[in-house]
């Protein structure tokens, strides 16, 4: 189970790093599509935190906290997306949220699987 958790951690780290960096550097393109409901400084802070916690996923002592934050961040993104942009696109955030929650549980548990 440890190997599965490590694979998920690396995949989630890559997913969140790319997603956060893309949003920070391409905010102007995304603003017209779906990012207009929050001001740019809020998006930049959230995405920089996403990138920071993506690095925390591969640092063993920070993994559970990083995974928990990224799960909450993904669920917040899903809620905002569903409210302002419609339901279908939010499913892209549900899967990473579930996987991050699984990693957080697996790393927080006293006896992981």
Image (spheres, rainbow, N blue to C red):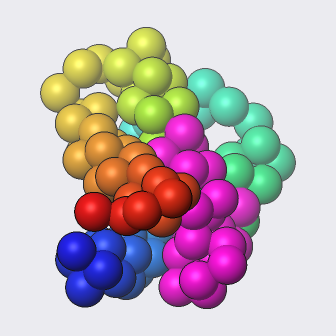
Q: Quick one: 52 or 37, which is closer to the camera? A: 52
The x and y percentages for residue 75 are: 45, 34
Which secondary structure class fits the magenta region best?
A: helix
Q: How many marks?
A: 0
| Outermost residue to the top | 83
Q: Residue at x 24, y 20 (%)?
A: 87
Task: Check residue 1 for magenta coloring.
Answer: no
Q: Residue at x 67, y 73 (%)?
A: 62
Question: Is 62 rendered above or below residue 29?
Answer: below
The x and y percentages for residue 35 are: 54, 39
73 relative to 5 in the view: left or right: right
Question: Is 41 rendered above or below residue 26?
Answer: above
Quarter in which the C terminus is drawn: bottom left
Q: Quick one: 11 or 15, which is closer to the camera? A: 11
Q: Residue at x 51, y 59 (%)?
A: 110
* Residue 20 appears in the picture as rendered: no
The x and y percentages for residue 38 are: 68, 31
The image quarter containing residue 56 is bottom right
| Outermost residue to the front | 111
Quarter in which the N terminus is drawn: bottom left
The x and y percentages for residue 100 are: 40, 55
Task: Check residue 62 for magenta coloring.
Answer: yes
Magenta range: 49-73
85 relative to 19 in the view: left or right: left
């Amino acid at each position: 189970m440890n190997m599965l958790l490590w694979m998920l951690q690396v995949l989630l780290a890559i997913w969140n790093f790319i997603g956060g960096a893309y949003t920070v550097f391409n905010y102007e393109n995304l603003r017209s599509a779906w990012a207009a409901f929050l001001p740019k400084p809020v998006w930049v802070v959230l995405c920089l935190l996403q990138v920071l916690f993506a690095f925390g996923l591969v640092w063993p002592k920070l993994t559970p906290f990083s995974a928990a934050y990224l799960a909450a961040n993904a669920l917040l993104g899903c809620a905002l997306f569903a409210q302002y942009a419609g339901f279908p696109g939010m499913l892209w955030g549900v899967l990473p949220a579930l996987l991050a929650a699984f990693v957080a549980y697996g790393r927080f548990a006293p006896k992981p699987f």
